[in-house]
Amino acid sequence: MKKIVVFGLCISMYSCIYAQIGVNTSKPTKTLDVNGNMRIRKLDIINSPVNVLAVDHEGNVKKRQDLQLSPSLGDIKYGMQKNDHSGWFLINGRNINTLPSEKIKKNAYALGFSEYLWDARNRYIKYTSGSNGTLGGSHTVKLTTQNLPSYNVSTVSANSGGHSHNLLDHHMGPAGLYAINDRKGTPNNKTGIDKRFQDITQTRNTNANSWSHTHTASASVEGQGQAFSIEPEYLTVNLFIFLGE
């Protein structure tokens, strides 16, 4: 009787060790075969590098040893870090020869850098169809006359502009006898051969004769040509590029 009991226990233990458990399936094909969705409520947190579990197209959970969750060469990110870290390098215009290893230098050259990294300090990133690393733009603007729209300046005077002039009119004596600066004869003598020039002041109005004319005026703006800033409000962070470790 004792032999039968021991034999039965051995069979039960062997069955438990090599048993396959099926969840929502009567024919499990793996040690644990789950036919349906899984929910894991809690897992331990670890800090050391580990392999990654992956699921193939048939739903089998397997371990991937060659899978690394890391950025690719040339990836760019913003960060609050002040210095290079974990393969990320500040894009600050440094000479490639100052990078810490030959591998990282080679990666920089492979990405298209020639002698220096780009200098992203005080610049915005712009998506463009042009070449990477192209620098352009300015945070200040100085207006010129070509930047201003076309405009006219008009003025209105108090009246039509008509005005009078007082003229000193010299009346001559007989033709050919006397010169303007050699006024011979008797003063105020208006008759006879001794009559001389007589100064008479008369008034002439420019509205009534060919003396009417126009004036052209010009004005200048005494500006200093100072540039002004067009920089919007901003938040300062650092820009990094991944060159590998």
Image (cartoon, rainbow, N blue to C red):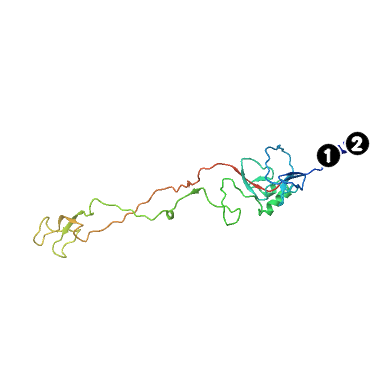
Q: x%, y% of residue 15?
A: 82, 41
Say left or right for 211 vs 23.
Answer: left
Q: Which residue is mark 2?
A: 3
Q: x%, y% of residue 26?
A: 74, 46
1 vs 2, front mark: 2
> In the current view of this chain or complex, which residue is farthest to the bottom?
176
Hey, what amino acid is under mark 1? Ser
Question: In terms of secondary structure, where does tag 1 sit?
Answer: helix
Callout 2: 10 Å neighbours few (<14), some, many (20+)?
few
Q: Which residue is mark 1?
A: 12
What is the spatial separation of the Cα atoms under label 1 and label 2, in whole angstroms? 14 Å
103 to 4, vertically: above or below: below
Labels 1 and 2: the sequence-earlier one: 2
Q: Which mark is residue 77?
A: none
Q: x%, y% of residue 97?
A: 69, 49
164 to 37, vertically: above or below: below
Say left or right for 107 vs 158.
Answer: right
